[in-house]
Amino acid sequence: MGDDAQSLIRTVPRRGYLFPREALVSVPRRGCLLAVLPFENLSSDPEQHFFAAGLQLDLEAALGLVSGLDLRADPAVADFHLSGGVRAASGSIRVTARLSAAEGGRQLWNGRFDGRADDIFSFQDEITRKVAVAMQVELTKGDSARLWDGQTSSLSAWERYVEAHGFYLRWTEADNSRARDLLREALEIDPDYTAAKVMLAKTWWYDGRFYTRGADRLHAIAETERIVNEVLARRPDAANALMTLGGAAWLRDAHDEAIAHCRRACELSPSDAWVLGFGGMIHIFSGELAEAQSLLVRAASLSPQTFAWVDYHIAHAQAWIGEHEGALPRINSYIAVTPQDPWGQMMLAVVHSFAGRTGDAHLAVAEALRRQADMNMEKFQRSHRYRDPARLEKVTAMLYSAGLPA
């Protein structure tokens, strides 16, 4: 970094790391588009993959909070690419990172960081800071204060969080429970680990939507709300927590409350793919189809990770809007990524039914039952909570005609 850039640096006492005080040049009107490519595991031990995966997740989360940066899933539509690798062995770690211009591949910055495994958090701060400077994006005081909010300084807690994230994305009851156990362990180590608290709330929400009934379901919803309200009491601008609170309101059929929380969360974090995607899902069930599709399509373009479930919900929205030919490749894309999930086949049946392909709808329901023998109408109605009873009646009639048991 040159002397001019160094003169723009100040120390933030909160963490002791350095952040830019002002921009090198003005921020482009539309913001800079950044694709975070998967960080490579350069270790001989495949078990060390979690270091690379976890570092990528945390860098995406931090960079997504920087004003003037938009993260993109597709490197082809980004202005800049951030890539790198992690080598961990015997308690030591080396992180390499490179920032390149998408056009022409000109390298703007590269860095190498060596230290102990528990130094990885300082590496994350340093990489984020230097990427922001190299991209000439203004890193405001508010951004620097928020960059690592919700994170932890404990390597042991972070490892459990990364492992829990992997289990959570498997979308089964057993894996969801395992993720919750790991998150509780992380919070025992670091009770102030906000990101772990929000994910813990999401595991309860998932139980409340798919796996529990009666009093157990109400308990799962109450736990979701208790945890996220605890987070929001300390951090009212935590968009993920606010969106999860909206999800809990939706499970209680409080659609107006859910939409209000979702819209506020999207205002707080307009470049967070998970927030936009989840908000899009809630808008579908509340009957706000145009807004739902807008949020979901933006989520698909922003996500630095593979959020297959966004395709699922885009297909759902398009089925209701009547864009049948667009819905089919979306739901097939979801099924290709998550072939074990019977809900993909259920949504495929809905898409075929809306398009009048009754034979294909029958085949899709049969495949869903093959994958989960106890799939039935009660499970569908419990997890698909439409504001308008007529919409629920229409969809359930379609699935019943396609062979879904009551």
Image: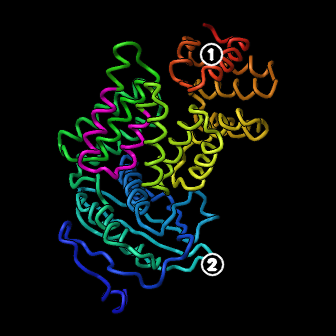
Q: Amino acid at mark 2?
A: Gly
Instruction: Give me the residue at 73% from left, 12% from top.
Output: 401
Q: Amino acid at mark 1?
A: Arg
User: Badge 2: how crowded within 10 Å, few (<14), some, or many (20+)?
Assistant: few
**Near-viewer residue (206 or 235):** 235
Q: Residue 187's x, y, as percent?
A: 22, 40
Disc 1: which residue: 370
Instruction: Give me the residue at 45% from left, 29% from top.
Output: 254
Whole-number angstrom distance, CA of label 1 to CA of label 2? 50 Å
Disc 2: which residue: 104
Q: Residue 213's x, y, as percent?
A: 41, 14
Residue 394, compared with residue 239, is above or below; it is above
Residue projecting furthest to the bottom: 3
Specify the quadrant that holds the N terminus.
Answer: bottom left
> Which SS does the magenta portion mostly show?
helix
**Near-viewer residue (242 or 153):** 242
Magenta span contains residue 110: no
Which span of residues is magenta-colored?
222-247
